[in-house]
Image: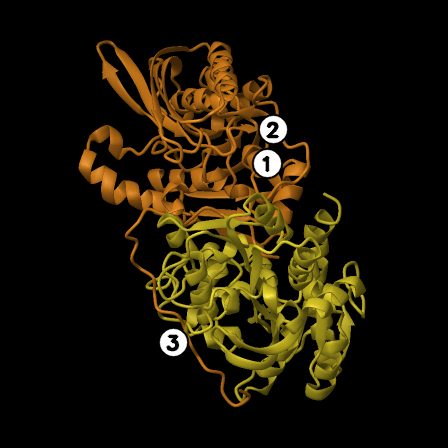
Amino acid sequence: MNKDFVLSCPVPVTDRKHIVMGHGSGGKLSAQLVRDLFLPAFDNEYLRKLDDQAVFQAGTSRLAFTTDSFVVTPLFFPGGNIGELAVNGTVNDLAMSGARPLFLSAAFIIEEGLAFEELSLVVQAMGKAARAAGVSIVTGDTKVVGKGSADKLFITTSGVGLVPDGISISASNVQPGDDIIISGSIADHGMAVMSVREGLEFEGSILSDTAPLHELVGAMIATGAVHALRDPTRGGLATSLCEVASASAIGIEIEANKVLVREDVRGACEVLGLDPMFVANEGKLVAFVARDSSAAVLEAMLRTRSGSDARVIGRAVEKHAGMVLMKTEIGGTRIVELPFNEQLPRIC
Amino acid sequence: MKYLDEYRDQRVAGNLIEEIKRTITRPWVLMEVCGGQTHSIVKYGLDRLLPEQVELVHGPGCPVCVTSLETIDRAHAIARMPDVIFCSFGDMLRVPGTHGDLFKIKSEGGIVRVVYSPLDCLKIARANPDKQVVFFAIGFETTAPANAMSVWEARRHGITNFSVLVSHVLVPPAMRGILDSPNNRVQAFLGPGHVCAISGWTEYEPIVDRYRVPVVVTGFEPIDILQGVLLCVQQLEQGRAELENGYARAVQRKGNAAAREMIGRVFRVCDRAWRGLGVIPQSGYSLTGEFSAYDAESRFDVSRIHAVEPAVCMSGEILKGLMKPLDCPAFGRECNPENPLGATMVSAEGACAAYYSYGRHLVDAHSLAAGSR
């Protein structure tokens, strides 16, 4: 072997005849699925915007409409359960258009054999979360499937909200020069769920950040010119930034040192080899705000409970359109790319 | 965060880079052995902060990348069997065999579980007495102690529905292979910090002496890597070839005695095929005869599965440090993490995957250079 290593490589694996987990990761595979399958089949001007919600005119009002499914494992995790996520997730998708959330629907797919006690806890949590967010769950549906046909409980919520006059917030509205503000620490939710997932259990104090964000958004849009809002859920902050950079055809530059990751969350990420930039949040938003009003918007955020750790992490720029650049802790530069797939804990 | 922030300090990094610039008088080629080091270099943009005379080439130290296609095909054959729960480290799931990856097998009904510690497999085995639980035991010396421990504990507790598919690899034989290669360009090594935390560095002393090549045991944080580069450059400039420990907070000369003892009880050294590099003599671990009952290869009779690896990409050249990912015409086009053509694209810590994930193909070197923003 000294003279010549044998050069050998595997054949390419290009065919995907089945859906794989990556298609639901929020990364490139998800984007491909939307672009190649859903968009052509459903094509219309609202869907084409690829925002987290559709905003349309209904009579004299502008309504926001969204839907989301929740399939988290396990159902209960430190800091919350699937019920709170199902309410807050849809409330937040509405809020990201600047809308005031009004009504929700809830559909339950329940696996045969689920403990009544568990379902009851989830439903109670949903009621409580809805009251806290000031929304009413006004319609719903229940289906039970045979054992093995679902994983305990899946919930789908849809929501309708009212967009105030004069508000136009979209991932495609960002202008070069906008400041980028994140409402608090990142990666809490994903790591809280990870900490109780089978095979990865670790002890700790990490709690999910699940929370409704419409009040925070209300305070922001009352103060200054908010161009785009995203709640960086699946795929994390990195995915939201990449989506906005692409939708608005602007470049994004952020600084790693300005992004807040709580100590325990960071420790867990380091141990598992995960990048907190790609880990899910359920109670955070990232905002693109006109530079001349960003100081006032930040002030307003800091006065709210869910924005008390808000900070500017970077800005939108004209160059390198569609790309997200991050100044690293030691002063280097790295490109933040949409991941293909969900992150996997690494070997060592 | 303690023991982390100190090693990502911009001021310290700046000082080290200045020191490297003051020391260096001519071009040198350094290889970082570990995939984890490659990942850090690209993630933090370290290579772009160093003076141009320092060329970092990326070594073979990504265990996921170098696991042979044959072994992966055998693993997949086992994972497809009914009544098998196949357990693996997370980043092994995406590695393609001849007929797809473990995700594909999972989507077709196979039971595949990600574990962080191999000992968790024993819990799964206890909870599922009617299933066979198989762990894909791969990795360098770093993962060997815990993997050995899972077999040891299985025997101690009489857990019989557990077995391991072993494909362990060892670093020193691969380094010798690189240095023996007629086209070798590597003049110094950033040694594998976590491997040495287990095995110590005595095995590297003969390499330093025989090949007159500096080896600096190096960690994985940006400051660790910059310090490793500085120590290598100092040795090269002064004409020295020594073993230095740049990772003193984790590594001792004799390594971790308890871990080495556990390895010695369960594993023996054997020849091993490396993906992209071919068979390297005495470069892996397999189970000793005493533990052969836990060998998944014979339990599931998959040793007859052979795989041919057609030469369509350059990962072998990259693993030896002869080429860089961007030198490959397929990089970022036909070859990407979703459709990897070769070893170095398949794991996050493979050199090509690191370049791809951090978008190295999207912008030219100039616009990423320090101070351009």
Q: Which mark is residue A196?
A: 1
Percent of width and height locating residue B249: 79, 58
CA distance separating discs 3 and 1:
41 Å
Question: Residue placed at 19% from the left, 34% from the top?
Answer: A43
Instruction: Give the labeled residue for mark 3.
Output: B308
The amino acid type of the residue labelled 1 equals Val
Instruction: Name which of mark 1 and mark 2 comes first in the sequence.
Output: 2
Q: Nearer the viewer, mark 3 or mark 2?
A: 3
Number of disc labels: 3
The amino acid beneath tag 2 is: Pro
Q: Residues within 10 Å of mark 2 (few under 14, many from 20)?
A: some
Quadrant of res B227: bottom right
- Left/right placement of residue B86 relative to residue B283 reads left
Rendered image: mark on residue A78: 2
Residue at 44% over, 79% down: A7
Camera-side residue of B2 and B364: B2
Chain appearing in orange on the rendered image: A
